């Protein structure tokens, strides 16, 4: 496999924040944060820290020249806690010194006296106390209350899904420097350079034009650097501004795990009604989102839970309610899937429980209710180019679902302590920011006189391969060699007002902008060539493989000649272009509209083996038919699918965040928080590309790929349940992820675990 950056990465030549060549005299910041989950700061004394070795300054709320406010959607987030602290890890001050260790040492000399208040940690408790970030959100279709009487089966239940640490390889960080006009230039590990620029401008009280944010690449983001890279950048900028010196802040791993946001834990209630033929007639759900201490992106994430509340199924009567519950934990944030996985886990749990009650396979219900062309989602959008049934039936036939089931049954008949299970998981994910205004991007393309090409966009490379994809799109549009093209860093002075690279929309939005910019240049070059070749109609000029064609016939002109001729004729070789996704809208009052440009579909089978003596398990296989549209970069797309799937498996199985009753994260190291390792990899991973799925709304007819494959991991939960029920059909099926080996044992043996074994 070749990634755009792989050679540089392997040689250690890629620049992450901690690799940037630092100016002489650079100072280091260490973040001092609240040790308690909820309380008042009665007294705080920085004097000993200020006298500590190497210290240049300590900055807190009172030192902010502008506003102490970095909230994005809601203005409820202080850069530094002022009078109250709301979670363990709530930043209070930044200590700046000549070395990182000196700054850290000094932070231990800060003396603070707190009045402790009782923390709220549970989202249902928060909801009861009316501690909500925003008023409840509700999506409705049909008439749920009237439908229950028509159902032959009504099944109710409760589900819980845990949070998830992003564990990007590169921790959060930024390097700030002052500029000659009294501004700030900053390198930040952020998915949203403009967000960083806007917040620094707010905190320092400077116009955005004086703040330049540059992003070379991220060592992974996964949503964790969409909103939450901002605070550290603002602190570095503040310290640089105060001290007139460069300041670098890079969080150490343990601080990063402790004090930055993660995927939202959810607790949910469901009620599903079906006919005896297995048709889903009604669905009602209430989602309690654990938002943490401040809003961050929680409201947008809450909405995506509702957008995906019925996964890839048509349900005529739906009422889905979602509450964003304010607790004294870290502000939970974007993570691959953006609330979608949490909603889909609840619906798949409902199907599973209904199948149990009806004594049929969940796949029967799944299959009978898949979306078809023209079906309406609860938010009013209708399916178009719907691939739900096609991916499902192809999954059944290509992977021989029935045969897999038979083999598992015969294995289970002849094995007592080791059991196998399989589960089917269809997926559906809407592509676009549901906050419609964010669906915009621009590109800046320069062609130099030697024919080399330089492209700037809003896209941030974080390992997902957006740079390789943009390079391909530009080369294809200009009909030149990819070797001519360099993708530049993401920089707010070159490309303004950028949306974060998120919602899987990086390639779609920026790719279309690149195509638009390249088309401007092509037309200019066509005109130059037409004049050169005596052709009256410039549209008769075409390009192919670096050569110029006139009415389809090759000429002596090459791309490089033409570039030179354009320059000599004083024709601009730079183009800027803008793209905004057409024909999308969403009304947050009625909760109806067409928020998505299109949907990504797929269907997978998951096979697992459970050691019912030890509670351990292995994923034997994941086989999916996935809808990539017309993929133009199969290696990247396959890598995104595999990476997403494994991250999904981790969320469903081993990654367990635990807090004690004081609100302290007790799984704050890799010894206690278990991410998938090589042993957790499915023994077999088959990613089949759905054929004949051209996408009218993606660049080169492709589809976005970043987030949707994460959803296949949800199937692992139900495959494990099936294996456990093969061991003991009477176990109590709980929908409480992650399903760690400990929970497997407790489920299999109850409180008798270990007795008599
Ligand atoms: N892949 C890698 N290697 N690293 C990442 O940080 N982030 C994911 C996904 N794939 C991520 C990744 C998330 S959360 C999103 S939204 C998309 O990539 C963002 O990139 P794209 O819009 O260019 O697909
Ligand atoms: C998916 C996303 C995002 C989203 C909506 C999606 C996302 C994001 C925002 C958002 C919303 C409102 C704001 C803002 C950001 O919405 O990543 O700054 O004011 O940041 O459906 O991934
Ligand atoms: Mo992805 S969670 O939209 O950064």
Image (spheres, helix red, strand yellow):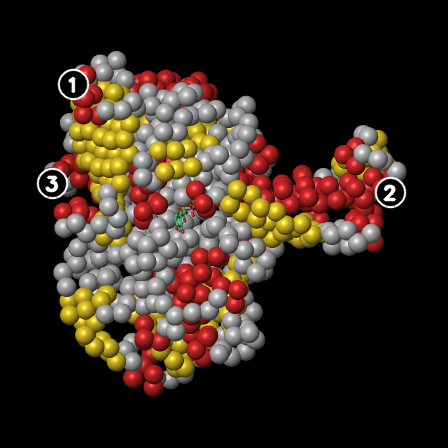
- Mark 1 and mark 2 in contact? Answer it, CB < 8 Å: no
Which residue is more in the foreground, 520 or 491?
A: 520
- The x, y position of residue 345, in whole percent, is 29, 35
Quick one: label 2, few (<14), some, or many (20+) residues within 10 Å? few
Element on which disc 2 rests: helix
Q: Residue at x 26, y 67 (%)?
A: 34
CB contact under 8 Å: marks 3 and 1: no
Distance CA(mark 1)–CA(mark 2): 78 Å
Task: Give the x, y percent position of residue 553.
Answer: 84, 31
Residue topped by disc 2: 532
* Residue 751 located left or right of residue 104: left
Q: Position of residue 215 (x, y in %)?
A: 52, 58
Q: How crowded is mark 1: few (under 14 residues within 10 Å), some or many (20 or more)?
A: few
Crowd class of label 3 (few under 14; some 14 to 19; many from 20; radius 10 Å): few
Q: Which of 193 and 601 is in front in this view?
A: 193
| Label 3 SS | helix
Looking at the rendered structure, which numbered label has been put on residue 149?
1
Name the residue rendered at 45%, 39% in the picture. Answer: 432
- Cα separation between marks 3 and 1: 39 Å
Numbered label attached to residue 12 = none
> Which label belongs to residue 751?
3
Q: Quadrant of the N terminus?
A: top right
At x 26%, y 80%, the residue is 45
In the image, is residue 236 above or below residue 709? below
Nearer-the-camera pick, 202 or 84: 202
Position of 24 relative to 33 (above/below): below
Mark 1 residue CB less than 8 A from any atom of ligand 2: no
Above or below 9: residue 382: above
Viewer-nearest of discs 1 and 2: 2
Q: How far apart are marks 3 and 2 (CA)?
A: 86 Å
């Amino acid at each position: 496999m070749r990634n755009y950056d792989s050679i540089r990465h392997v040689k250690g030549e890629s620049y992450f924040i901690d690799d940037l060549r630092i100016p002489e005299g650079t100072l280091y910041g260490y973040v001092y944060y609240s040790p308690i989950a909820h309380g008042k700061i009665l007294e705080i004394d920085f004097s000993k820290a200020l006298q500590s070795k190497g210290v240049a300054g300590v900055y807190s709320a009172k030192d902010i020249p502008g506003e102490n406010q970095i909230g994005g959607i809601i203005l409820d987030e202080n850069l530094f806690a002022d009078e109250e602290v709301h979670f363990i890890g709530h930043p209070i001050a930044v200590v700046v010194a000549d070395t990182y260790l000196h700054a850290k040492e000094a932070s231990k000399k800060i003396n603070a006296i707190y009045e402790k208040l009782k923390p709220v940690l549970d989202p249902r408790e928060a909801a009861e106390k009316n501690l909500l970030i925003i008023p409840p959100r509700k999506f409705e279709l049909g008439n749920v209350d009237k439908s229950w009487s028509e159902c032959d089966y009504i099944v109710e239940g409760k589900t819980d899904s845990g949070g998830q640490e992003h564990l990007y390889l590169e921790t959060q960080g930024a390097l700030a420097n002052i500029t000659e006009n009294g501004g700030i230039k900053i390198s930040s590990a952020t998915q949203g350079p403009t967000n960083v620029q806007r917040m620094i401008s707010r905190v320092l009280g400077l116009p955005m034009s004086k703040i330049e944010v540059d992003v070379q690449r991220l060592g992974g983001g996964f949503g964790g650097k969409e909103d939450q890279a901002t605070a550290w950048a603002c602190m570095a900028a503040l310290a640089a501004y105060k001290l007139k010196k460069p300041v670098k802040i890079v969080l150490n791993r343990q601080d990063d795990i402790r004090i930055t946001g993660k995927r939202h834990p959810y607790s949910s209630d469901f009620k599903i009604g079906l006919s005896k033929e297995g048709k889903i007639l009604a669905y009602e759900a209430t989602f309690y989102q654990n938002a943490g201490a401040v809003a961050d992106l929680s409201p947008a994430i809450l909405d995506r839970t509702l957008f995906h509340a019925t996964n890839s199924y048509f349900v005529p009567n739906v009422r889905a309610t979602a509450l964003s519950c304010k607790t004294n934990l870290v502000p939970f944030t974007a993570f691959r899937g953006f609330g979608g996985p949490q909603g889909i886990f609840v619906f798949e749990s409902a199907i599973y429980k209904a199948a149990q009650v009806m004594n049929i396979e969940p796949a029967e219900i799944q299959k009978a209710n898949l979306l078809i062309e023209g079906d309406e989602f609860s938010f009013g959008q209708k399916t178009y180019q719907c691939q739900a049934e096609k991916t499902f039936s192809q999954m059944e036939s290509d992977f021989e679902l029935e045969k897999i089931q038979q083999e598992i049954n015969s294995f289970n008949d002849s094995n007592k302590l080791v059991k196998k299970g399989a589960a089917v998981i269809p997926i559906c994910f809407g592509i676009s920011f549901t906050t419609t205004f964010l669906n915009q991007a621009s590109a800046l393309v320069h062609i130099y006189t030697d024919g080399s090409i330089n492209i700037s966009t809003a896209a941030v490379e974080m390992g997902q391969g957006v740079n390789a994809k943009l390079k391909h799109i530009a080369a294809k549009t200009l009909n030149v060699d990819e070797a001519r093209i360099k993708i530049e860093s993401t920089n707010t002075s070159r490309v303004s007002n950028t949306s974060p690279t998120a919602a899987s929309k990086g390639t779609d939005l920026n790719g279309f902008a690149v195509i638009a910019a390249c088309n401007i240049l092509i037309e200019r070059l066509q005109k130059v060539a037409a004049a050169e070749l005596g052709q009256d109609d410039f549209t008769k000029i075409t390009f192919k493989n670096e050569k110029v064609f006139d009415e389809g016939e090759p000429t002596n002109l090459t791309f490089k000649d033409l570039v030179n001729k354009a320059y000599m004729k004083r024709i601009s070789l730079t183009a800027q272009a803008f793209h905004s996704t057409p024909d999308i809208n969403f009304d947050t009052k009625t909760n109806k509209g067409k928020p998505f440009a299109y949907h990504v579909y797929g269907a997978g089978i998951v096979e697992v083996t459970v050691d019912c003596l030890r509670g351990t398990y292995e994923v034997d296989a994941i086989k999916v038919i996935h809808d990539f549209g017309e993929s133009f970069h199969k290696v990247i797309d396959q890598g995104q699918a595999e990476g997403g799937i494994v991250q999904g498996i981790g969320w469903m199985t081993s990654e367990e965040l635990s807090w004690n009753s004081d609100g302290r994260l007790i799984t704050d190291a890799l010894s206690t928080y278990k991410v998938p390792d090589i042993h957790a990899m499915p023994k077999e991973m088959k990613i089949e590309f759905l054929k004949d799925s051209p996408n009218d709304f993606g660049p080169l007819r492709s589809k976005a790929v970043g987030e949707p494959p994460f959803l296949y991991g949800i199937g692992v939960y139900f495959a494990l349940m099936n294996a456990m029920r093969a061991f003991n059909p009477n176990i109590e099926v709980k929908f409480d992820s992650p399903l760690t080996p400990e929970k497997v044992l407790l489920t299999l043996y109850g409180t008798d675990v270990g007795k008599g074994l």
